[in-house]
Image (cartoon, rainbow, N blue to C red):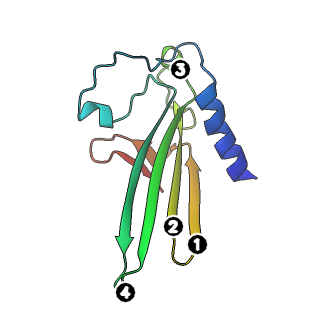
């Protein structure tokens, strides 16, 4: 049930536009590496890491790791606070492994508020993490 609620929160954020958030519009001037990192003024964003692996017997696997950031406090409503329980966004991660030959698909999901540094984005050393 928790997984359903987690993905429902992400889906809701993808389809609802709230006042105070930046909107992705044509004409954005991309600048890298800046645009690989977090954009706190946008409500929803995600990062994909995908690839293929081969084990020592030649069996092939595919994987995907996706991090999602879902803003919950618009930029114009953020205020400095000493409480770790007031956060600006929620952090989600989704990891999958596909074994086509074995006809298996494995996945794992995580969600975190990141209140104690256990999840976050762009801390200078890491792009995204969730423990």
Instruction: Tell me the residue that label 4 is attached to.
Output: 57
**Circle 4 crowding by C-alpha within 10 Å: few under 14, some 14–19, many from 20:** few
The residue wearing badge 1 is 104
Residue tagged by mark 3? 74
Q: Which of the marked residues, 2 or 1, is nearer the chain's N terminus?
A: 2
Element at badge 3? loop
Name the residue furthest front. 101
How much space separates mark 3 and mark 4, taking CA atoms?
Answer: 50 Å
Q: Residue at x 26, y 31 (%)?
A: 34
Q: Is residue 119 left or right of residue 51?
A: right
Q: Which residue is mark 2?
A: 98
Q: Earlier in the sequence, mark 1 or mark 3?
A: 3
Query: Mark 3 or 4, which is nearer the eye?
Result: 4
Q: CA distance from mark 1 to mark 3?
A: 40 Å
Residue located 69% across and 40% down the image: 8
Disc 4, SS: loop
Task: Give the CA separation, mark 4 to mark 2.
Answer: 16 Å
Identify the mark nearer the N-term, 3 or 4.
Answer: 4
Given this view, does label 1 or label 3 mark the residue nearer the observer?
1
Separation of marks 1 and 4 at Cα, in angstroms: 17 Å
Q: Residues within 10 Å of mark 1 (few under 14, many from 20)?
A: few
């Amino acid at each position: 049930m928790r997984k359903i609620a987690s993905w429902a929160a992400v889906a809701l954020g993808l389809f609802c536009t709230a006042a105070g958030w930046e909107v992705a519009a044509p004409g954005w001037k991309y600048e890298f590496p800046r645009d690989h990192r977090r954009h706190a003024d946008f409500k929803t964003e995600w990062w994909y890491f995908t690839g293929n692996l081969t084990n020592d017997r030649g069996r092939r696997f595919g994987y995907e790791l996706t991090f999602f950031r879902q803003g919950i406090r618009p930029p114009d409503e953020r205020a400095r606070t000493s409480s770790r329980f007031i956060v600006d966004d929620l952090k989600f991660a989704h990891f999958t492994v596909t074994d086509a030959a074995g006809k298996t698909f494995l996945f794992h999901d995580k969600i975190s508020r990141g209140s104690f540094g256990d999840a976050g984005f762009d801390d200078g050393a890491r792009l995204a993490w969730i423990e």
